[in-house]
Amino acid sequence: MSQPAVAALAPEPFDFELVFDDGEPLESPWHRSQITFLEELLLQHLEEQRWTDVYVGANEFVYYSVEQARQVAERVGRNRPSEEVRGPDVFWVSGVDPTVEREGWVSWREGGRLPDVIFELFSKSNTLAHRKQKKELYSRVFRTAEYFVYGPRSRRPEGFRLIGGDYRAIEPDARGCLWSEQLHLFIGAWQGVFRRRSAHWIRFFRPDGSMMLTSREQLEQMHRL
């Protein structure tokens, strides 16, 4: 049995239950679809690269400390959920067993590991102060190697790479795409249809510049030939 699986069976270091659902819906249909889009592409990338030690999470709680877990339990217990208690919209953790059943990401069950790559989607509720707070959390506490943000109105992804103890902006290429050293992919904006919804999305492009297609897009492409 792997180390994370053994840790999951151990008693928790506190006397309250972890919360994995605050009852708050996602901001918009676009947010739901974009999260699904990114998750689907990341899982496909894992299969194509035959990487078997990566976990992809989407719209899940991420617990990084017992004190944070206690605060979440207290807030939800008082029916006062907050955006601050949620995890990233989409995240990627390498060096772990992805087959372990999880309700969310609990760092002390995972040998202290936290996300290596994070994607956050802008929303109306994301104030500048809130964005700054999350950016500092991911750099100083999570030590997340790469952090990407995007909103349908901006139509331009932003990326940051952890250098030393701080994030530095990832410079876009001539197409406006950002290179991810962790994923070995470019992240770029794209206008098109995903699951019958026409919008501006972020998606992935291979090192040669070709667009990574979902399995459904691949089938549709084959039928058009």
Image (cartoon, helix red, strand yellow):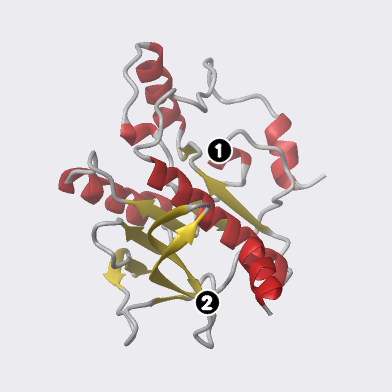
Image disc number at residue 106: 1
Q: From the top left corner, tell me how far across and down residue 185 is, in percent.
A: 51, 75
Decide which of 126, 147 is in the foreground and name it: 126
In the rendered structure, which amino acid carries the disc numbered 1? Val
Q: Which quadrant of the structure image shows residue 200?
A: bottom left
Identify the image quadrant of residue 17.
top right
What's the distance in space between the residues labelled 1 and 2, CA to CA? Answer: 33 Å
Mark 2 and mark 1 in contact (Cβ < 8 Å)?
no
Give the residue number, with chain letter if any, for mark 2.
Answer: 211
Along the line of sight, the residue nearer the viewer: 58 or 222: 222
The residue depicted at 62 percent of the width and 45 percent of the height is: 110
Task: Using a 10 Å C-alpha cutoff, classify the residue at mark 2 as few (fewer than 14 neighbours), some (14 to 19) or many (20 or more).
Answer: some
Q: Give the class, few, some or many, for how many residues have Cα within 10 Å of label 1's Cα (few <14, many ≥20).
A: many
Where is residue 36 shown, x and y percent of the image? 53, 49
Q: Position of residue 67 (x, y in %)?
A: 40, 29
Looking at the image, residue 216 sits to the left or right of residue 143; the answer is right
Q: Which mark is residue 62?
A: none
Q: Which residue lies furthest to the left in this view?
A: 128
Is residue 132 found left or right of 210 in the rendered image?
Answer: left
Q: Which of 213 and 109 is in front in this view?
A: 213
The picture places residue 216, in percent across and down from the top left corner, at 65, 61
Which amino acid type is marked by label 2? Met
Q: Residue at (66%, 70%) from the top-left corner?
A: 218
Which quadrant would the C terminus be assigned to in this image? bottom right
Secondary-structure class at tag 2? loop
In screen coordinates, is 182 left or right of 215?
Answer: left
Q: Which residue is drawn at 55% across and 38% down?
A: 106
Q: What is the quadrant of the N terminus in the image?
A: top right
